[in-house]
Image: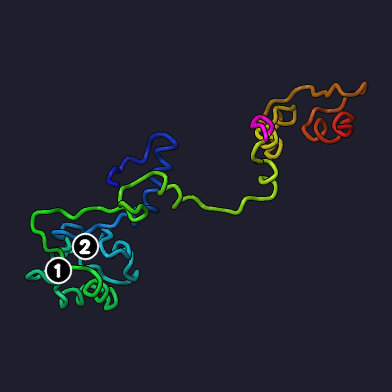
Amino acid sequence: MVVPWKQGSHIWRKMLECRDEIEHKIVWKPRMGSSLFWFDNWTRLGALYFVTPPDFYCDESVHNVYDVIVYGSWDEKKLLEILPQELAQHVTENIKPPLLHHDLDRPYWSLEHKGSFSVKSAWEYTRRRKDPSVVYKNIWVRGLPFKITFFMWKVWKGKLSFDDYFRRLGYFMSSKCWCYANPYEETMEHVLFNSYAARTV
């Protein structure tokens, strides 16, 4: 979460892009109140810096959660001064004030029951689930040999290495399909759909 480096491989850059989306799923459990008051998600609502209204002034003289603790209890007056009323009320009513003096606040990954981070849960959260299309349901069929499934997927995506595919890549050549005495241009549509052999099959 603290690495600033934005260069590197494609995978690394994608990981850093996901970081901003999933960071608020790390919940900090107050123990001594060492969490950053404005920038850590210790209220389970998200970081207060982003939860408060855009025009709200954040008093950054308050650095940590323990800055709003007085004699083991929440400093309700200070919370009302620095937070909107509903957020201050949420803190005082739903979060126990930190009481441990020598134990740092601990991060908890809220997407896993045990609180430990897993790539799987982060991926499931960040991916955009969509209902599979009818085409994909007919291509990815359980029990169908993978080479046939993969071939059909390449047909659907237009990625078979016929002459028209190479032309899209910028390679121009004499193109002939030898299925007729008078050959046509070799294209995926011709070879797999319009040729005599394809129509016969």
Q: Is residue 93 left or right of residue 163?
A: left
Q: Is residue 96 left or right of residue 128?
A: left
In the foreground, 27 or 16 = 27
The residue at which mark 1 appears reads as 68
The residue at which mark 2 appears reads as 37
**Residue at figure coordinates x 37%, y 48% from the top left:** 19
Extreme residue in the front direction: 143
Evaluate if marks 1 and 2 touch, with contact meaning CB atoms under 8 Å apart: yes
In the foreground, 80 or 116 = 116
Residue 8 lies, in percent from the top left, at 38, 34
C-alpha separation, residue under disc 1 versus residue under disc 2: 9 Å
Residue 24 lies, in percent from the top left, at 34, 57
Label located before the other in sequence (1 or 2) = 2
Extreme residue in the right direction: 181
Residues shaded magenta: 144-148
Q: Is residue 180 visible?
A: yes
Residue 20 belongs to the span the image colors magenta:
no
Q: Callout 1, which amino acid? A: Val
Q: Quadrant of the C terminus?
A: top right
Magenta: main secondary structure equals helix
Report helix, strand or loop for mark 1.
helix
Neighbour tally class for label 2: few under 14, some 14-19, many 20 plus, Cα within 10 Å: many
Q: Callout 2, which amino acid? A: Phe
Up/down of 21 relative to 7, above or below: below
Up/down of 198 relative to 44, above or below: above
Residue 13 lies, in percent from the top left, at 41, 40
Q: Is residue 149 left or right of residue 69?
A: right
Report helix, strand or loop for mark 2.
loop
The quarter of the picture where residue 90 lies is bottom left
